[in-house]
Amino acid sequence: MSWLGHAPQPSHLLVRLVVGRELSLPEVAAAHAEALAVRIRVLRLRHAVLTAVAERGLTVEETDLMHKLAQLSEDERRRLIGDFLESAFGGLGTGSAFAGIRRSVTLELPDDAELRRLLLARLESVNDPRRDRYVQLLAVINGWPAPQGLTPVLDWAVEAVRVRVER
């Protein structure tokens, strides 16, 4: 059901509903705009998946997985990322510093293209493999457990934002 409680209708029936004053023109226009927005989101997802397949030469299995990941809801995506971070950083602590680290590697992509470009520049500037080496040396000096490097995670984040910026 759409069209404010009405089943989808061919255009000539919508004209009748508007002329008969069952629906206002702004209601029909709003419904059309929302339907187009949904279609655009679907096309952007398909474009992103197909671009990744073409650029990376993915296998059928990898393509299927990527397609499934692209169809996740925002809540499902957050849960999946949370589970990954828990398995990657589990046992390192739950203090405010650790919470900050988790937030810093969990991206919320803004819709504004300029903000995305700024985010990309920032991620590229902090994605320095020397930072991982520095943190490893700090761990040795301070007797901390050796941390896993964040370069692979930051590489992924840079690529994810870059794909959004290039749209």
Image (tube, rainbow, N blue to C red):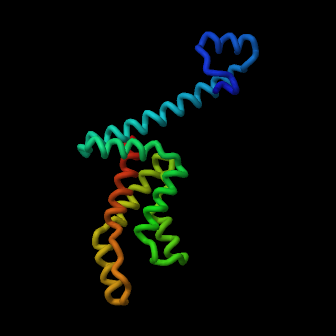
Q: Residue furthest front?
A: 61
Count of numbered tags: 0
In the displayed structure, would residue 103 be above or below residue 61? below
Is residue 148 shown above or below 152?
below
Q: Is residue 32 left or right of residue 17?
A: left
Q: Where, quadrant-wise, is the C terminus in this rendering?
A: top left
Looking at the picture, tell me which residue is in the foreground, 85 or 159. 85
Quarter holding the N terminus is top right
- Is 112 or 43 nearer to us in this picture? 43
Drawn side of residue 157 relative to residue 14, left or right: left
Outermost residue on the right side: it is 21
Residue 93 coordinates in the image, percent (x, y): 49, 78
Of residue 100 and residue 81, the one placed in the foreground of this image is: 81
Relative to 120, is 140 above or below? Answer: below
Give how far across and how far down residue 90 sits, in percent: 45, 72
Q: Position of residue 128 (x, y in %)?
A: 31, 68
- Which residue shows up at 33% across the image and 59% down it? 155
> Is 112 placed left or right of 62 in the picture?
right
Residue drawn 42% across the image and 67% down it: 87
Answer with the quarter of the image where residue 127 lies.
Answer: bottom left
Q: Residue 92's image quarter?
A: bottom left
Specify the quadrant of the image occupied by residue 84. Answer: bottom left
Q: Residue at x 30, y 44 (%)?
A: 61
Residue 103 rendering spot, x and y as whole percentages: 50, 65
Residue drawn at x 35%, y 84% is 139
